[in-house]
Every structure is written in C-alpha cells, then in structure tokens.
Amino acid sequence: MENILEIKNLKVDFATFRGTAHVLDIEDLCVREGEIYGIAGESGSGKSILALSILNLITPPGRIAQGQVIFSGRDLLKLHPREMNGIRGEEIAMIFQDPMASLNPVLTVGQQMVITIRQHRKISAKEAEKEAKRRFEDVKLPDPDTTFKKYPHELSGGMRQRVLIALALSCGAKLLIADEATRALDVTIQAGILDLLRELRKNNGTTILLITNSLGVAAQMCDRVGILYTGKILEEAPVRDIFKKPSHPYTKALIDAVPTANLKDQRLPNIGGFVPDPIDLPAGCTFGPRCPHVMEVCRRTKPERIGIGPDHFASCHLAKKSGDDNG
Ligand SMILES: Nc1ncnc2c1ncn2[C@@H]1O[C@H](COP(=O)(O)OP(=O)(O)OP(=O)(O)O)[C@@H](O)[C@H]1O
Ligand SMILES: [Mg+2]
C-alpha cells in the first residue's frame, strides 16, 4: 500500500511567557492509503496539535518550527494559502470532538451541505439538495427531508457528528482526520459513529487518521496504532502487536493499567507520576522520569526509533538493548 501521508521531523513550539513549549516532535509517521491509523495519547500529548499541523492550521503563539507534511506527494507546509484552502475539505476533511464548533449555527444543516457541495462541484441548488439528502442517507440520519431543514442546535450530538461526516463525504475527501470525534458522545452513539467510519473506509476507500484517548477505540478500529507521549510517537505497531507484544514501557504500563473487561470504552488510564512540562522536557527519554526500567543512558540520550518486528517500532533504549543482546 502506498503512503498517502508522510510526516517527517515535524516540530511544533508554543511561545509562552515562561519559555518555549515543545509540544510536537514527530520523527517519522506514515499513513497508508485506505488504512485506519490510530493516534492514541493522554490528554495534552499533542493529538490535536498534530491534527492541526497536518492542515497547516497552527497559529501564533504556536509555530511549526520545522518538518514536512507530505500528502499525495506535495509538502502541505510549503503550499500557497490558496492551494492549501483547496486541499482542506476537498482532499482532507477533519471532524472534531465538538461538532457544534464546526457547524454554522445560523444556517440549516441542509444549507451548509448545499453550500459545501456547490463549492466543489458546478451543479444547481436543486441537484445539490438531492445530493445532500443522499449523503444524509449514507450516514444514516433519520428522515433526510426533515433533517435537511434543521439548525445544528436542533440535532443531537450524534446527529451533528453524522452531518459533519456527510459534509466530509460530499467533498470526496481522500483522508479524514477524526480528532476524538466520539469523545462527547455516549457509548451507544459512539459505537454508531465508529461503525459509520468503518463503512466509510470500506465503501469509499477513505483513509482515516483516528485520534483517540481510548485504547479500546484504537483496538476496535485501527489497522496500525501510534502511541503519542509528550508530542512523540513512542511506539508504533499493527494494532494486534500493540496489545499482544507492547515493547515500550509506556505502552506496557497503559495496557496493564486497563482492566481487560473495560477495554471497550476506557480512556487512557493514569499510570502514576507526572507528564513532564513541555517547556522543560527531560534531556533524554521523556518517559524516563516515570519509567520503571529507567537506565543511566535514558536520562542523557534521546532514544532512536528501533525496529522490533514487521511494521513495529519503539523509541526506547531498552528495546535497543534487547535487540543488541539478541544479536
Ligand atoms: N495555545 C497554546 N499555548 C500554549 N500551549 C499550548 C497551546 N495549545 C496547546 N498547547 C499545548 O500543547 C500540548 C498539546 O496539546 P493538544 O491540544 O494537542 O493535546 P491533546 O492530546 O489533543 O489533548 P486532549 O486529549 O485534552 O484533547 C499541551 O501541552 C498543551 O498545553
Ligand atoms: Mg485534543
């Protein structure tokens, strides 16, 4: 499978009155065409900043200090703002935790669909309305004719999220970034939205970057998962290996802390200790201060990304050591 998205050495900083906060440092992240790639991380690990960086939407006091975001062969960080506007929505769509914030409160959801559809295709308002209702059916919104005339506040959270997915669909986006799209929803409604995302991938081949702070959601949904901590991917693997053969002590601690019975909708658990301050990150491994296996080298030197197995990587001195020991 080809990579649709490649992120290389991407660093994002925030200027704060206490100093520079280093919130994102992604060495190498590739998303393959047609897969569901999960980013799992605790609150504050940099998930939303990653999503915003991909769309070049970081605004001051934040800045992309360096790096590349290559989408279908083009570096999005180098595009002219007008070209980037074309890509947002048309080729890459994003759905957020709070759908209300992405919908216009003074227009009906039908009007918003028609506007979006006609921005992308030269068709009449009547045709666009038909298309909008068809999309509402695709995302299983009840009674498309009635829904079409509703304002966002007249819909439930789950229905609003479906409208956003319909909007993303109607532009034919190849990549959908879902930033905790189900976090504000209750469990049954969450399951419905997750099913819908799965269908979207199956029927339209849409690639999905699924951002979550639930290991359960990652387990149910993803082909591969990256574990994010202090803006860095500490481990990446096919979903089964993340759970069966976790290599990074942070991943292990997360998995051990979740009772299996609760895996289904459990948020990432608290594993004890504190996440370091992004203004004053440890010199070596950022997980070192919380790691039960911390060694002298971990305090001094940043761990490299080490291959553990097929498609499986961990940034950990211990992983390197056991690799070396095994020959
Ligand atoms: N405007 C800002 N100024 C300074 N720091 C910021 C700003 N926005 C985000 N950050 C910092 O960037 C880091 C990552 O934030 P981000 O919103 O990406 O976290 P997240 O993983 O999405 O968390 P959550 O699960 O709570 O949504 C955090 O340490 C946060 O404090
Ligand atoms: Mg977030």
Image (cartoon, rainbow, N blue to C red):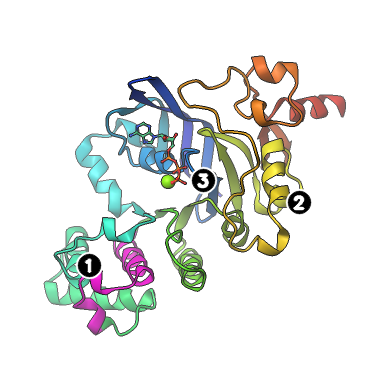
Depth order, front residue of 120/261: 261
Q: Is residue 104 above or below residue 212?
A: below
Depth order, front residue of 231/76: 231
CB atoms of marks 1 and 3 within 8 Å: no
Residue sitting at x 53%, y 55%: 36
Residue found at the far right of this picture: 326
Based on the displayed image, in which of its 4 quarters is residue 114 positioned?
bottom left
Pointer 1 or 3: first along the chain: 3
- Amino acid type, label 3: Val
Q: In this view, does 241 lie above or below 46?
A: below
SS state under label 1: helix
Tell me which segment is drawn in magenta. Answer: 145-172
Query: Badge 2, how many Cα within 10 Å: few under 14, some, many 20+?
Result: few
Residue sitting at x 65%, y 52%: 239
- Residue highlighted by disc 3: 31
**Majority SS type along the magenta span:** helix
x then y, percent, for residue 69: 41, 35
Where does the C terminus fall, quadrant-wise?
Answer: top right
Q: In this view, does 66 lie to the left or right of 117?
A: right
Residue sitting at x 38%, y 73%: 139
- Residue highlighted by disc 1: 113
Q: In this view, does 159 lie to the left or right of 133?
A: right
Residue 72 appears in view: no
SS state under label 2: helix
Q: Distance between the residues labelled 2 and 3?
A: 22 Å
x then y, percent, for residue 216: 61, 58
For label 2, being within 8 Å of ligand 1 is answered no
- Residue highlighted by disc 2: 244
